[in-house]
Amino acid sequence: MARFRTAQVAGALAAVLTFAPGAFALEGQNPGDADDPTFSRATIYRQVEKLRVLGRRMFRDPALSASGKMSCASCHDPSRGFSPANAASVQLGGVDLDRPGLRAPPSLCYKQGAPPFSRHFYESEEESPGGGVDAGPTGGLTWDGRVDAASQQALIPLFSPFEMANKNASALNALIEANYGATLRKALTDWMPQGPHPALQAAVKALQIYQETPQEFFAYSSKYDAYLGGAAALSDQEKRGLDLFNDEKKGNCASCHISLAPKTATRPRFTDDGLVALGLPRNREIAANADPAFYDLGLCGPERTDLKDHPEYCGLFKAPTLRNVALRKAFFHNGVIHDLRGAVAFYVERDVKPEKWYPRRADGSIDKFDDLPPQYWDNVNMEPPFGGKPGDAPALNDAEIDDVVAFLETLTDGYISNPRIGRR
Ligand code: HEC
Ligand code: HEC
């Protein structure tokens, strides 16, 4: 059985739920408080476990959508590292399941330990003795970091008109009440949230707690974990791939997708949670992109609205974990690349073979960075493995790209059948 830190358990149930202003506010007086002498760790533990089981069921339950046909698992398939099962760039949702989304659903694995969003992130003293440098915008959930808690996050798909499309909080509360009301009250006894929409409040908490389940969401059970633990050897090709992944002058992947455990954790999450502009090609399969004036600029909007006056943030998206990445079929925020080898090749060929990645304009010139208006091109990352000019040798040759892909394939969970869960 997983071990929990007391604070984590208490936080999971006792935190007051306050959601983003605007949409609607849910404020429950949740029961239990760490300072309350009647607050028993065992009681909280039991409530949390019951909510976890319910959250697991709700995650897979299409009854929570307006269509009656779409669940969280429709876009986040538990057997594929919580990525979509199909290869579409973006998924269809809405009342009639015919409304296309704007972004590729990310994996939901390894979100634990991701810091809340901040524009100026400093590494802890422990990780960077003497005080860290400003790592820039970092953290949060979604591709643009616009929410911090998984409970808040769940409200986005539950109400998005192109996802689960529930009309409003009252309608969804009624739906949850009809399907789970009695079960929730029984599980939570007199701990049911107070205030408006109690069933909805309990449901989003249950979904959050489910997504904190180590065995399913952060198992650290890949071949690479076995290798780090001394229980497996990497093949020669996988080892070469790891070295190229780490080498600052070659792949330099580990500068953003951290491959070694920080001192405070037992295993690396393969992301530094930083938001960076990679200058990906525009995906013409996304319906919103039929409008030439529309751009998904990530951190500066239009999905995220609080940083719209910050041109220096336009085009920045969050670096995802690369754990379980080999189970994905559409890569990057706009799902424009459909195979893992292509995703790796993009990095090393973007600047030296742009003709392979971007379309040509009518005059024959290459329309590089065609998903970003020119005034934001300075935001695009130029560090290795990027850089060089057309015709130069790429940072990784074809065989080396294959090696990196072979290494990335060692990051799929399930290699160790009975993992010892890390101490996070
Ligand atoms: C129609 C497809 C779809 C459905 C259904 C859906 N999601 Fe998502 N999910 C997405 C997309 C797309 C994103 C990225 C959104 C963005 O960046 O704006 C996302 C992002 C997330 C994230 C943030 C992950 C990260 O990397 O920061 C979480 C957590 C999440 N979803 C949980 C859920 C839960 C819980 C449900 C069910 C209540 C759900 N999703 C239903 C498509 C979906
Ligand atoms: C400067 C930071 C940085 C470096 C260096 C970097 N990445 Fe990334 N990576 C990102 C960001 C940011 C994204 C998401 C960008 C987006 O979707 O707009 C990403 C996305 C990815 C994805 C898509 C994952 C998914 O879930 O869709 C893959 C695969 C990937 N990176 C592999 C690599 C490899 C392999 C290397 C080295 C060759 C590398 N990255 C180097 C920041 C970086």
Image: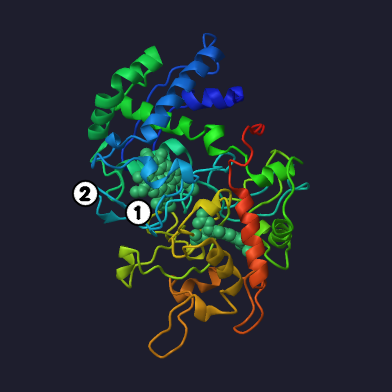
| Lateral position of residue 234 relative to residue 22, left or right | right
| Residue bearing the label numbered 1 | 91
| Lateral position of residue 123 relative to residue 338, left or right | right
The three-letter amino acid code for the residue at tag 2 is Asp
| Residue bearing the label numbered 2 | 96
The three-letter amino acid code for the residue at tag 1 is Gln
Q: Alpha-carbon distance for marks 2 and 1? A: 13 Å
Measuring from the top left, give residue 137's x and y in whole percent.
56, 54
Q: Residues within 10 Å of mark 1 (few under 14, many from 20)?
A: many
What is the quadrant of residue 344 in the picture? bottom right
Q: Nearer the viewer, residue 409 or 212?
A: 409
Q: How many marks?
A: 2
Which structural element holds mark 1?
loop
Q: Residues within 10 Å of mark 2 (few under 14, many from 20)?
A: few
Examine the rendered structure and indicate whether residue 120 appears above or below residue 16.
below
Asked whether residue 171 is in view, the answer is yes
What is the quadrant of residue 256 in the picture? bottom right
Q: Which residue is drawn at the image coordinates 26% and 34% (left, top)? A: 172
| Lateral position of residue 102 relative to residue 415, left or right | left
